[in-house]
Image (spheres, rainbow, N blue to C red):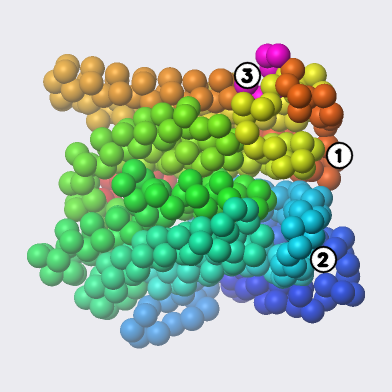
Amino acid sequence: MVLSEPLLFYGVLFPILISVLLPVLDDVLGEKGTAALATLLLLAPTALIAFLLTKAGFSEPVADPVFFYSDSLGSFSMLLDALSAPLAISIGLVTTAIAVYSLPYMRHRFEEFHEEGESPPGWGTYYMLFVMFSVAMLGTVLSTNLVEFYLFLELSLLPSFLLIAFYGYGNRERIALLYLIWTHIGALVFLIGALITGLNAGTFDFYDTVSMQPLIGLGSLVPEGLRMPVTVALTVGLFVKLAIFGVHIWLPYAHAEAPTPVSALLSPNLIGIAAYALVRIVYTLFPLEFASLKPFTLPLALFTIIYGGLMALAQDDFKRLLAYSSISQMGYLLAGVSTLTSAGVAGAMLHYVAHAVGKALLFATAGVLIVQLHGLRSISKMGGLATKMPLTASLALIGFMHITGIPPSLGLWSEVLIVTGIAGTTLGRSSLYFASLLTILLVGIGLSTAYAFLTMKRIFFGEPSEAAGEAKDAGLGLLGPMIVVAAVGVLLFIWPRILIDPLMTALRQLLVLG
């Protein structure tokens, strides 16, 4: 279904334009008014996406008419279909909830700045950058053109860089610069591959919103000797964004030291977009070349799962543990995508949603602990908090269940699909290959379960720590948005077919065409 007006584009454009006024309106609206307006700016595109999905159904693609055309660049449009819908829903849900969560959390952060004698930019600037960052991620997953995708990807990078630099912890300027350099390099490597592809193909489109079909194999117009190098450039550029082992160095610093509401967007939402782009862009344009990388990408994914799990086990700082956990979880996404089976890729997209819900809850839990325990992040100094913070403990448990695949969590279905996809890659292989792959996968899943529930035990159970003496649950300002995110996660566990069935149908068609 092609819309009569570019509603998806308007849903992305208007919040960005209006957010520019937030620093100006800050004095008039006050902190609560600014937070309310920012939340409405994020709720609007979320509601639009929900309305379009309800009207058309998850299985029918919905596209804007072309809102920009150039003979050299191609057509700019936006697409909401079975592949992009899970990401768009996750981004809308988490960013809107965390915008509400930000109000009480950033009050605490601004108090810390005041005690330290610092004066960062105020509420208007914070929420302007927050809205720009959030909506730019939506624009990225809805894009149908390589240049359009790159522009929104860069737009998501700059506000998130400033949010870390202005409001982060520790040596925040240096860490923000590290984040900027690494992720910008990844974007530039991707851009090189995109430019070579577009200039040779005569268009930068990767989806045709007239025929409502992906432009499968468009990369065949690239000279044969360049096809594999271009595929590798696109893939490696996205690997940096995905924080796969070897190009992951920036993530533990950026995600651990960002202000916690920003960590709750960086980890579950931003980095996983790269896994989506591997399917939507790289596989679509270069199906044969990307398929030939499977012997490298699948082992790398499994190694990333294990490396991230081991490093998470070794952490004492709760936010840093969650950052390494994100590296491990991105390994699951890459593993699913690498199978190039409908089950495996659907599992990866579903795991994006499960991780978005789970990690948003866990970073938000870290924020609650920081606020309630006067900045405490050391796990070894916690313990016995469940009796004093039962609601926080329950929400943290739900978060860990999502990333480890324990019901009632969407992570159960995503991991089943990913494992099914990986099992499909063993057909026709030796029993040794099957046993080796199974062993590595079980070790990775075991590590995820170990760091998750050992951390749960160390923070919330066991002997009460000194910190437990004054601990208590936070108010609804912090816990209310977390409850909403957790409730949606449980609903998706009960009704996963709303996402799985359209995904499987669309992917069977896409993978056969490739």
Q: Mark 3 to mark 1: distance in Å?
A: 23 Å
User: Which of the 4 image quarters holds residue 51?
Assistant: bottom right
The disc, 3 or 2, on the residue closer to the chain's N-terminal end is 2
User: Which of the 4 image quarters holds residue 219?
Assistant: bottom left
Q: Residues within 10 Å of mark 1 (few under 14, many from 20)?
A: few
Tell me the kind of residue under disc 3: Lys
194 w.r.t. 469: above or below: below
x then y, percent, for residue 306: 37, 30
Tell me the kind of residue under disc 2: Thr
The dot on residue 475 is 1
Q: Determine the residue positioned at 43% across, 20% down.
A: 446
The dot on residue 34 is 2
504 w.r.t. 24: above or below: above
Element class at badge 3: helix
Element class at badge 1: loop
Q: Mark 3 to mark 2: distance in Å?
A: 38 Å
x then y, percent, for residue 92: 64, 53
State which region is magenta.
457-463
x then y, percent, for residue 337: 35, 42
**Foreground pick, 87 / 455:** 455
The dot on residue 457 is 3
x then y, percent, for residue 374: 77, 41
Element class at badge 2: helix
The disc, 1 or 2, on the residue closer to the chain's N-terminal end is 2
Q: Nearer the viewer, mark 3 or mark 1?
A: 3
